[in-house]
Structures are given as C-alpha cells and as structure tokens.
Image (spheres, rainbow, N blue to C red):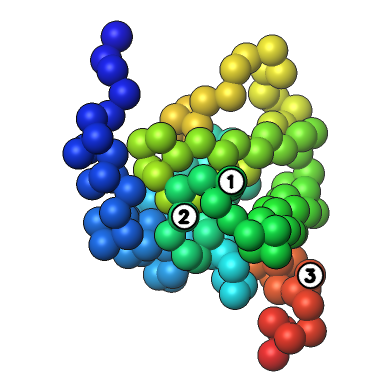
Amino acid sequence: MAPWWSDEEWRELTAPDRCGMCADAHLEENEHSVLLGSTETTHVRLSRNQAHPGYALVILRVHETNLSDLSPDLLAAFWNDVQRAGRAIESVLGPKKIDYLVMGHRMPHLHCHLLPQHETDDPTRNVDISDGPLLLDDGELRDRAAALRSVWLRAAPPTERA
C-alpha cells in the first residue's frame, strides 16, 4: 500500500497557484465539465462523464482544502449552493437519490460531487465517481446543461438573476 503524500507532494497539491480547479472552474467549458452557474461562493459544473445522469460538482471559488477551515457564513453559503444544485438535478432528471461526496485527497480544492442514483442503478453497490465514462455527444450535453442551468437560474435569489 502506498503511503500518504509526502509533505512536499502535499504542499504542491494544495498550492493555490498550482490548483487545476482554481485555474478552470470558472470557464464555460473545460476538459472535465461545463459551467451551469456561479454564485459569489461557488461554481456549479456538469461533468462530461454522465454515467450517472446529472453528475455535477459544486466547487468553492476560494482555494480552501477542508470544510473545517471555512467560516460559518462561507460554510452555509457552500451548502446552500450544493442544495440548490441538487434540487435542479432532482427537478430535471428525477433521480431516486443524490449522493453528496466531499473528498479532495487527490484534488485538494474544496468541492462536492453530486452523484445522482437512478432507477437503473444498483443501490447496494458502492458509489464510484469513475463509473463510465459515458460521454454524451455535444448536442446532448448542451441540452442537459441548458435544462439544468434554467432550473438553477430560476432558483436564484433576485440579486443573482439580474
């Protein structure tokens, strides 16, 4: 079994200037996902891997690695955005359940995976974010993103809708 990252490896992984999420979470599209919406607190992205239809991520805008480092207000705002994203997924895709995963030992930038579980999924199987990949064609991905984005925007506080 491999040991945890060395101190030097961990410093490099957690450095904001080397963070892949800091570099591209705000972009309309990146290698892994498309942007659904942003708030003052987060960027919400639809994963290109749609092995679980609606699989999305909520990524904290500031570079933090642990929930325990957030102020109470920032923590509440993060979870509010996670809940709002989950509600959009529920509205558009009707999963049986959404699993919310906060990990970050390989990409140490605070983010939450929203992994919908559908009627066809085995509820006794462990969650695996690497299922698939099932990549939609560009049109299908754009259509799914547009539907989710529409619900996301309708749920926005009035100050975000402007």
The picture places residue 141, in percent across and down from the top left corner, at 51, 56
**Residue type for callout 3:** Ala
Q: Nearer the viewer, residue 119 or 158?
A: 158
The picture places residue 57, in percent across and down from the top left corner, at 55, 50
- In the rendered image, is residue 34 in sight? yes
| Residue lying at 63% horizontally and 60% vertically, measured from the top left | 71
Counting other residues with Cα less than 10 Å from the Cα at mark 3, is it few (<14), some (14-19), or many (20 or more)?
A: some
User: Eyeballing the image, is 26 above or below 44?
Assistant: below
Q: Quadrant of residue 43?
A: bottom right
**Residue type for callout 1:** Ser
User: Eyeballing the image, is 156 above or below 9?
Assistant: below
Q: Quadrant of residue 1?
A: top left
Q: Nearer the viewer, residue 141 or 52?
A: 52
Counting other residues with Cα less than 10 Å from the Cα at mark 2, is it few (<14), some (14-19), or many (20 or more)?
A: some
Q: Secondary structure at mark 2?
A: loop
**Relative to residue 150, is residue 67 drawn left or right?**
left
| Residue lying at 67% horizontally and 17% vertically, measured from the top left | 122
Single out the mark in the foreground, 1 or 2.
Answer: 1
Q: Nearer the viewer, residue 124 or 25?
A: 25
Is label 2 in contact with label 3 (beta carbons under 8 Å)?
A: no
Counting other residues with Cα less than 10 Å from the Cα at mark 1, is it few (<14), some (14-19), or many (20 or more)?
A: few
Is label 1 in contact with label 2 (beta carbons under 8 Å)?
A: no
**Residue type for callout 2:** Glu
Q: Which mark is residue 68?
A: 1
Name the residue beneath numbered marker 3: 155
Name the residue beneath numbered marker 2: 64
Cα gap from disc 2 to disc 3, whole angstroms: 26 Å
Q: Reading the chain from its start, which is encountered first: label 2 or label 3?
A: 2
Cα gap from disc 3 to disc 1, whole angstroms: 27 Å
Q: Farthest top residue?
A: 1
